[in-house]
């Protein structure tokens, strides 16, 4: 009763900022919990006012569009632009979140965890205030959340905490549901040590690689008899659920030389104005694309060699204190660097620097040219042009024909995008469509993928005549890979007889490179994120060891020599044991929760009706 009275006394006055906080956080709760956009949905015709169903529950277009609008409003408040690719992602995320929210609410009822007492709400607020509350300026001290300030505020009867109470009341049932689902998760000390070593062991290797598509001396017999023999030998590889063949091209929106010149010209003009007496800090706050420093007038603070990219460091450490340097081009864009001070601590040279970063972004003209290219390409295909010939004439590098797509897999050239999936599995063969996408490469790029549906297949193993082109492509790929392996195998023989790695690569016509230090979780210079390559390196784990020839995840043939292995300091684990265990436990719990939600979606029979009008349903196999 006493706690109920406390809650009641906290409702006497209203602070507008809490209303805003509550709205923002509730939106995040609605769109965040279990929002796994890789979930699948069924097909079927529904009323045109219904976006879809979860069992007998209907999700109206009005609810769906209002939820999308909430995300757009949040982006507007954060001054975050929404690209066409982001809009596609938001629409899918919103749909699956509405589905997940209904599933969760059904479990709230069945497990009676939606019924909350004032005591639970107050204790949750005291024990674990929402991030939206923690981030309020009133509770910040020295740039961090102050528990003392928060508790003092919590005990102030003149503050109305109703919006925050609403916020916690909305969050708590989800917390309790997660606790129920994740009750069995735990982490042993041995698991934590293994994970710590997995994350923190570093290696550096030199390697020889051969791209199968660079191989010139290979042969493949594509006679009817050979194709049939290969098909029969690998027949189980072609067994599939409902699937399709597609053609696609990827058109990344990348900066042009003109865009680079525009960024450089802007940097030069800002330097002239700063040298004429205008404030560096003003331009940093209003022009810089570095979110971490722009709010502080561009200040980065003290740096030493090895902390920044090479071009930035060279400019900073070759300049004198008080000097303005630039424009300096790095992988991030053009920098204007001001040297605030320099000193030496022991033998370490340091520089106190501020900077303005001007990223090289595609201009509106560049974006428009790619959009026009995509539309013209679609129009030409719809007019009867050959996809392969047209793409070849345009000299488009990122293209593929007769690519197999399974209903549950990411779509090549796109990833997970339900509108694209609906087009592939509901429209008529021959249909062609463009999709705004975000290419999760390095760097991440916006772009357009144009997809043409070639054919769809029912469950089972397609007849050879239906996938002959795919089988021949597989035969050629296999032949190329064998030839690439033969090249690096020859290089391995040379290395075994004492030939240096680089010389061996040159003699067989392969590529040689070195990686620098990398860990199991990091990007490998010259290789990328390839898990097979990294697994082989850390699986061997001995300095000086040379691997056997193998094919990487990207299809390239490799051999490598481990130049350096640096294990983590065991003492570091003692200092980090708790945080490592907590991180692993969080991952376990998230995985359990996601799999539980995925199972609940499957059990609930979800029907997605959002694209029924745009793409007519055709029978599989037509």
Image: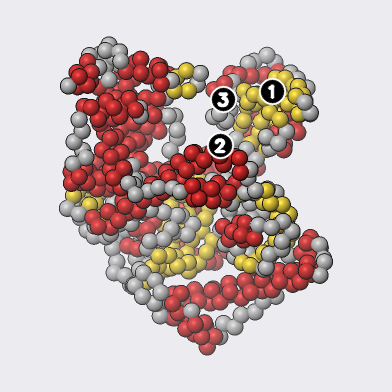
Using the rendered image of the protein, determine whether residue 275 is visible from the camera's viewpoint: yes
Give the vertical position of 149 relative to 175 (above or below). Answer: above
Q: Are marks 1 and 2 in contact (CB under 8 Å)?
A: no
Give SS at disc 2.
helix
Most distant residue in the top direction: 158
Q: Position of residue 436 (x, y in %)?
A: 45, 49
Q: Position of residue 128 (x, y in %)?
A: 35, 29
Mark positioned earlier in the residue sequence (1 or 2): 1
| Nearer the observer, 570 or 417 | 570
| Nearer the observer, 492 or 474 | 492
Residue identified by numbered label 3: 294
Residue identified by numbered label 2: 575
Using the rendered image of the protein, determine whether residue 195 is visible from the camera's viewpoint: no
Mark positioned earlier in the residue sequence (3 or 2): 3
Q: Quadrant of the N terminus?
A: top left
Say which residue appears at 52% left-offset and 82% top-offset: 230
Say which residue appears at 71% left-offset and 22% top-offset: 339
Q: Is residue 278 left or right of residue 94?
A: right
**Alpha carbons under labels 1 and 3: distance apart:** 16 Å
Give SS at disc 1.
strand
Give SS at disc 3.
helix
Q: Residues within 10 Å of mark 3 (few under 14, many from 20)?
A: many
Residue identified by numbered label 1: 352
């Amino acid at each position: 009763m006493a706690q109920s009275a406390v809650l009641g006394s906290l409702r006497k006055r209203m602070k507008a900022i809490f209303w805003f906080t509550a709205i923002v956080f509730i939106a995040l709760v609605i769109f965040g919990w279990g929002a796994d956009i890789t979930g699948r949905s069924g097909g079927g015709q529904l009323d045109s006012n219904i976006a879809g169903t979860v069992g007998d529950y209907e999700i109206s277009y009005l609810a769906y569009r209002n939820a999308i609008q909430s995300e757009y409003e949040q982006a507007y408040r954060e001054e975050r632009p929404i690209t066409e690719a982001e809009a596609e992602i938001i629409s899918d995320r919103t749909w699956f979140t509405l589905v997940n929210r209904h599933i969760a609410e059904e479990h709230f009822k069945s497990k009676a965890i939606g019924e909350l007492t004032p005591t639970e709400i107050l204790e949750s607020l005291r024990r674990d205030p929402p991030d939206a509350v923690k981030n309020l300026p009133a509770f910040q001290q020295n740039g961090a959340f102050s528990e003392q300030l928060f508790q003092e505020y919590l005990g102030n009867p003149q503050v109305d905490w109703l919006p925050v109470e609403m916020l916690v009341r909305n969050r708590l049932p989800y917390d309790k549901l997660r606790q129920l689902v994740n009750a069995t998760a735990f982490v042993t000390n041995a698991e934590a040590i293994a994970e710590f070593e997995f994350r923190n062991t570093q290696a550096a290797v030199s390697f020889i690689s051969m791209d199968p598509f660079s191989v010139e001396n290979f042969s493949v017999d594509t006679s009817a008899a050979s194709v049939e023999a290969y098909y029969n030998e690998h027949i189980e590889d072609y067994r599939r659920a409902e699937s399709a063949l597609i053609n696609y091209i990827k058109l990344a929106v990348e900066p042009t030389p003109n865009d680079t010149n525009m960024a450089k010209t802007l940097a030069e003009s800002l330097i002239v104005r700063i040298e004429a007496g205008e404030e560096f800090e003003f331009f940093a706050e209003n022009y810089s694309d570095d979110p971490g420093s722009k709010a502080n007038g561009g200040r980065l603070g003290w740096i030493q060699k090895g902390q920044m990219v090479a071009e930035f460091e060279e400019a900073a450490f070759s300049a004198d204190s008080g000097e303005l340097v630039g424009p300096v081009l790095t992988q991030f864009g053009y920098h204007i660097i001001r040297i605030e001070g320099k000193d030496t601590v022991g033998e370490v040279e340091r520089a106190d620097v501020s900077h303005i970063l001007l990223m090289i972004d595609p201009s509106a003209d560049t974006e428009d040219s790619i959009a026009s290219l995509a539309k013209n390409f679609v129009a030409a295909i719809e007019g009867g042009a050959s996809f392969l010939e047209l793409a070849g004439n345009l000299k488009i590098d990122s293209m593929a024909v007769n690519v197999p797509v399974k209903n549950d897999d990411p779509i090549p050239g796109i990833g997970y995008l339900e509108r694209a999936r609906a087009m592939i599995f509901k429209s008529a063969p021959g249909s062609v469509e463009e999709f705004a996408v975000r290419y999760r490469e390095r760097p991440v790029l916006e772009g357009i993928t144009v997809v043409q549906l070639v054919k769809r297949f029912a469950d089972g193993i397609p007849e050879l005549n239906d996938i002959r082109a795919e089988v021949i492509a597989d035969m050629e790929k296999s032949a190329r890979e064998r030839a690439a392996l033969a090249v690096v195998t020859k290089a391995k023989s040379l290395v075994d007889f004492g030939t240096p790695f680089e010389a061996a690569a040159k003699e067989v016509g392969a590529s040689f490179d070195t990686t620098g230090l990398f860990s199991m979780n990091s990007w490998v210079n010259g290789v990328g994120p390839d898990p097979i390559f990294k697994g082989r390196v850390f699986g061997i784990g001995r300095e000086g060891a040379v691997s056997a020839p193998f094919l990487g995840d990207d299809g390239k043939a490799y051999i490598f020599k481990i130049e350096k292995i640096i294990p983590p300091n065991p003492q570091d684990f003692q200092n980090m044991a708790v945080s490592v265990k907590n991180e692993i436990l969080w991952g376990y719990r998230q995985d359990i929760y996601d799999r539980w939600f995925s199972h609940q979606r499957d059990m609930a029979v979800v029907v997605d009706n959002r694209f029924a009008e745009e793409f007519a349903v055709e029978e599989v196999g037509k």
